[in-house]
């Protein structure tokens, strides 16, 4: 038996060696020229290299010790390189090799549900990531003639955004505000609301804390949003070079789906830290500083990124990329350098007020300073019935409220405008992680526009809204379906919905509650107490 096994093993080894000899004999040696340079200087996150010629911009370079870098400055005598890893392994004199490949990332369906860094290295412990193809992180934006108008809305599930600051698929809508005002919360709620809409979502975190990154990932998992999402993070502990290429890598992954005819939502959280990372690299590489020490091309750095967000023509698949860049302001200064740059690049902005946030009015969107220059044309027709009157009445309320705080005597019309405005503000409040369907938003906005909430105490408005939504969904499925499909509401349909809403409010009233016809005057103290109670009862919609 042993002799039989040893003979089989001998035959197997003989066949193996014969095969190796045959393959080796068929191989033809080929000489290749490999360019090798030397490190002349190394600093935090950067290196300057000599001895390499013909380098391409954004070309990948390898240092001894398997450290990866990207050609950034192409000077006559040396190459400025930004490092993708820590620079402790690199010293002056370390050898550097060319690859003749520009910085690229894998793209494809296999990336869905994964958490990775800008070099597509997994951060979720689920194994290596391999895409269908490798695409460069820097790609030219679509030509003007290849683009189509924005015609389809991208619903966020937030009443104040969908009704007053609508976003369309293919639009670039800036989210800005001071720290801890709920910028990330709006972006995460928008991603959660894309469930069952066939929209691919990519969240790109730049310079965030690791704890904040873990919180975002946990929120997306808890809402089952990871099935259609890709999460990319370059945290504050990562080198500035990795933070710099992060948004370009995320946009390249989005372009793969767009060119396949899919709709994509990309969140850049946030571009303020991206600008700071670029400033750090530029100063280390001796690029001339400009305003606030930022390089002169900081505008182009962000414009060439966001110009890749568009809606393609049907002949090219009809896909789209909707970009939600986030930036952080300081002391509500939206006229600073980076905010004004991004405001001029994008198609509108959602401004979050720290004052509203402190009062518990969340999402803390300042309607007066927010605008959407494109999305209104893509807005569902049902919203157009309520958005114009709602925005006008709310703007009047905000203007009058500032004067009413001085204790001046006001007439009856002004008092009614203030009471209506406070109820509109209460209706626009919304807890985090609870995006609303289109129909639920429309029926409540119709009700507040028609004054159905005027005689209801402010503290009871959210409960009354829920009763209206439940009753209309139960009794009028036809109208609900028409709203969600984008059909125009006829006058008869509107009257039917309003009649049902009135019945829902009448049947829910109990003895002791405010009866119809009575006026409920909410003084400044009551309004302030309401804001404080809401701030304590609702989960805080904060940046993570």
Image: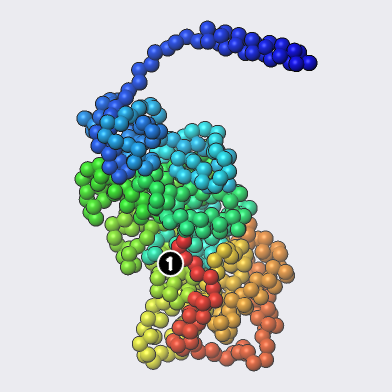
The residue singled out by tag 1 in the image is 181
Label 1 secondary element: loop
**Residue ID at (26%, 34%):** 92
Image coloring type: rainbow
Crowding near the residue tagged with mark 1, few <14, some 14–19, many ≥20 C-alpha atoms within 10 Å: many
Image quadrant holding the N terminus, namely top right
Up the image or down, 422 lies above or below 483; here it is below
Q: Is residue 200 left or right of residue 210?
A: right
Q: Is residue 258 visible?
A: no
Quadrant of the image occupied by residue 257: top right
Residue 333 in the image, given as x and y percentages of width and height? 31, 65
Frontmost residue, 130 versus 39? 39
Q: Is residue 346 left or right of residue 255?
A: left
Up the image or down, 482 lies above or below 386; here it is above
Residue 309 in the image, given as x and y percentages of width and height? 44, 46
Quadrant of the image occupied by residue 270: bottom left
**Residue ID at (25%, 29%):** 50
């Amino acid at each position: 038996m042993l002799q039989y096994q040893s003979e089989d093993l001998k035959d197997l080894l003989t066949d193996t060696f014969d095969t190796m000899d045959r393959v080796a004999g068929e191989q033809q040696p080929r000489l290749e020229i490999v360019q090798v340079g030397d490190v002349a200087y190394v600093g935090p996150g950067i290196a300057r290299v000599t001895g390499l010629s013909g380098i391409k911009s954004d070309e990948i370079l390898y240092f001894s010790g398997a450290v990866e870098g990207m050609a950034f400055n192409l000077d006559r005598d040396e190459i400025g390189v930004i490092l993708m890893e820590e620079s402790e392994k690199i010293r002056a004199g370390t050898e550097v090799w060319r690859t003749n490949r520009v910085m690229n990332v894998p793209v494809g369906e296999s990336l869905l549900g994964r958490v990775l860094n800008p070099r597509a290295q997994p951060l979720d412990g689920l194994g290596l990531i391999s895409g269908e193809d490798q695409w460069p992180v820097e790609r030219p934006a679509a030509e003007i003639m290849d683009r189509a108008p924005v015609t389809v809305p991208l619903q966020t599930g937030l009443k104040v955004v969908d009704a007053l600051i609508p976003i369309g698929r293919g639009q670039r809508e800036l989210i800005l505000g001071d720290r801890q005002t709920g910028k990330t919360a709006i972006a995460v709620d928008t991603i959660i609301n894309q469930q069952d809409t066939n929209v691919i979502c990519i969240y790109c975190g730049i310079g965030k804390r690791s704890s904040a990154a873990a919180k975002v990932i946990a929120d997306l998992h808890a809402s089952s949003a990871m099935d259609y999402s890709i999460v990319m993070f370059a945290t504050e502990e990562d080198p500035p070079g990795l933070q710099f290429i992060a948004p370009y890598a995320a946009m390249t992954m989005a372009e793969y789906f767009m060119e396949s005819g899919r709709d994509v939502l990309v969140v850049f959280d946030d571009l303020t830290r991206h600008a700071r990372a670029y400033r750090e690299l530029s100063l280390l590489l001796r690029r001339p500083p400009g305003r606030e020490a930022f390089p002169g091309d900081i505008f182009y750095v962000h414009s060439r990124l966001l110009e890749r967000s568009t809606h393609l023509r049907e002949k090219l698949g009809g896909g789209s990329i909707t970009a939600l860049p986030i930036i952080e302001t300081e002391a509500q200064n939206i006229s600073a350098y980076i905010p004004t740059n991004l405001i001029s690049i994008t198609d509108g902005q959602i401004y979050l007020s720290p004052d509203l946030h402190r009062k518990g009015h969340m999402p803390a969107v300042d309607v007066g300073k927010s605008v959407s220059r494109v999305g209104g044309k893509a807005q569902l027709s049902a919203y157009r019935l309520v958005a114009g009157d709602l925005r006008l009445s709310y703007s009047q309320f905000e203007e009058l409220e500032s004067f009413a705080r001085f204790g001046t005597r006001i007439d009856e019309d002004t008092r009614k405008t203030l009471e209506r405005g406070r109820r509109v503000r209460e209706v626009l409040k919304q807890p985090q992680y609870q995006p609303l369907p289109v129909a639920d938003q429309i029926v409540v906005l119709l009700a507040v526009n028609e004054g159905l909430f005027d005689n209801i105490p402010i503290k009871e408005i959210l409960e009354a809204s829920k009763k209206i939504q439940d009753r209309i969904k139960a009794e009028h499925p036809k109208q609900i379906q028409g709203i969600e499909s984008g059909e125009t509401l006829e006058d008869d349909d509107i009257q039917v919905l309003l009649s049902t809403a009135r019945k829902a409010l009448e049947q829910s009233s109990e003895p002791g509650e405010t009866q119809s016809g009575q006026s409920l005057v909410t003084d400044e103290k009551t309004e302030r107490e309401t804001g404080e109670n809401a701030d304590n009862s609702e989960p805080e919609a904060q940046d993570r």
